[in-house]
Amino acid sequence: MRDLREFIACCEQDGELKRVTAQVDWDLELSHIAKLNEEKGGPALLFENVKDYGSPVLTSACTTTNRLALIMGMPKETSLVEIMREWVKRTKTKVPPRFVDKAPCKENIDMGDKVNLFKFPVPKVYPKDGGRFFGTTAYCVTKSPKTGWVNLGTYRLQMLDERTLGTQFIKGKHADMMLKEYAELKKPMPVAAVIGGDPLLFVLGAARIPASESELDYAGAIRGFPLDVVKGETVDLPIPATAEIVVEGEVDPVAMLPEGPFGEYTGYYSGIGTTPRPFIKVKCVTYRNDPIFWLTTVGRAVTDTHMTMALSYGATLWQELEQMHVPGIKSVYCPPEGAGRFIAIISVKQMYPGHAAHVGTAAISTEMGAYGLKTVIVVDEDIDAWDLPRVLYALSFRFNPARAEFIKRGRSTPLDPSLPIDAREITSRIIMDATIPYEWKEKPIPIAPDAELTKKVQARWAELGL
Ligand SMILES: Cc1cc2nc3c(=O)[nH]c(=O)nc-3n(C[C@H](O)[C@H](O)[C@H](O)COP(=O)(O)O)c2cc1C
Ligand SMILES: [Mn+2]
């Protein structure tokens, strides 16, 4: 799959997409239709008649495991855990992108005064949002001025005026780390905010890929071929050739403008009112003919963003545990109900005393775990990580709170509503070992029915009238 259009065609063929031809208002109406549709488990939507605009808006692309499987190029019935297993397998060897000269994303080029972000049908999502957010699926391409490492990160981008996008690069995110490097050099940071291209790039932009690694190389690895990229018009950055819309510009590391608020995937606003934050001064916009604008819904779980993150956070956690050579990992699951990021469940085949503790402490040391992850549950191999009733069984009958580990201080997300609004930089964590300790000589004896008698009884089922 090379672009959003191929994904749309693929969804349509599989009965996973509906075109909405009735006129819909970009101002709240569109997002509310998308959200309600997602809550009913509906298809991806392509809004073809957006009020005041002539180009379409795509929503709900990632809401179901069916469509996540299609994005991964797998059969649509594939389960989330199988999709993650495949991600882990395919990303063992990274495949860097290759530069091409011609690209569909250059079909239209608006420079300088011609730039007008209001040209695109950017929806307003919730009534209390500070404005229209150009970036929900947009990923920012940036480059480290020190090492040349290219990063893709999905960060919200607010339309502040025709040529300005407000940013929220949370501390320690890769664009924030790079912006600090530019600040040391007293230079603005070139950036390209991209919508579309291979849909996997949005998923990867939102994924917790370790620092110094490029999401573009992961995309190549998952696809099995290098991604086509093209140089920017005004920025020296690799831009996915099949992107729908590319916004090129610069971020001054010192200048700030009020940004926000925005209804987040936690179901809450991340702060109160606006906050001064860095912004992108847009120099150039390039786009395909009839560009497709792409929105992911946020707000109460579980809908589009939550499913995206359940896949990408689960897969990257699993992949890093493999990279750390933690043995015996059977499955990993980061429930979409926790937006894929606050709770992780890991199933392990224990092979030595302290193995479950090894898994738990390794998990919170990964790129994914060292950020907002608060609860890690480790279960034995007879329980699948996604089998929540069995996980609750393990928490009831195998878990002893005295074997929980508390970590008092860890990096947090300012989006976590469980922390006071002015103290969200640091969180605590808990590792819940819900396994039977490996080293116990006397282990609880599981009840097993008599096999012979079970067969006999089954044979009498009809006679028993059951
Ligand atoms: C819809 C959506 C909006 C997001 N908004 C932000 C944001 O405004 N700021 C931020 O730091 N992360 C945001 N994230 C999370 C990042 O995409 C995620 O942490 C990712 O790891 C960032 O890339 P990086 O690891 O290369 O920094 C958002 C994710 C999604 C799916
Ligand atoms: Mn990154």
Image (spheres, rainbow, N blue to C red):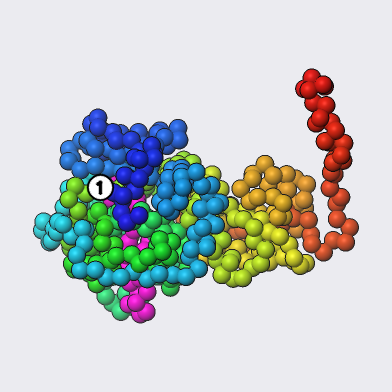
Kind of residue at disc 1: Ile
- Write down the region rendered in magenta: 130-154
Residue occupying image coordinates x 77% and y 50%: 398
Of residues 258 and 67, the one nearer the viewer is 67
The structure residue drawn at horizontal position 84% and vertical position 61%, both measured from the top left corner, is: 440
On whether ligand 1 comes within 8 Å of the CB at mark 1, the answer is no
Residue 257 is inside the magenta segment: no
From this viewpoint, is residue 290 visible? yes
Q: Is residue 225 shown left or right of residue 425?
A: left
- Residue 163 x, y percent position in the rendering: 19, 56
Label 1 crowd (10 A; few <14 / some 14-19 / many >=20): many
* Placement of the C terminus among the 4 image quadrants: top right
Where residue 18 appears, as percent x and y from the top left, is 33, 35
The secondary element bearing badge 1 is classed as loop
- Residue 433 lies left or right of residue 325; in this view the side is right
- Which residue position is annotated with label 1? 292
The spot of residue 68 in percent (x, y) is: 44, 48
Residue shown at the point (13%, 61%) measured from the top left: 111
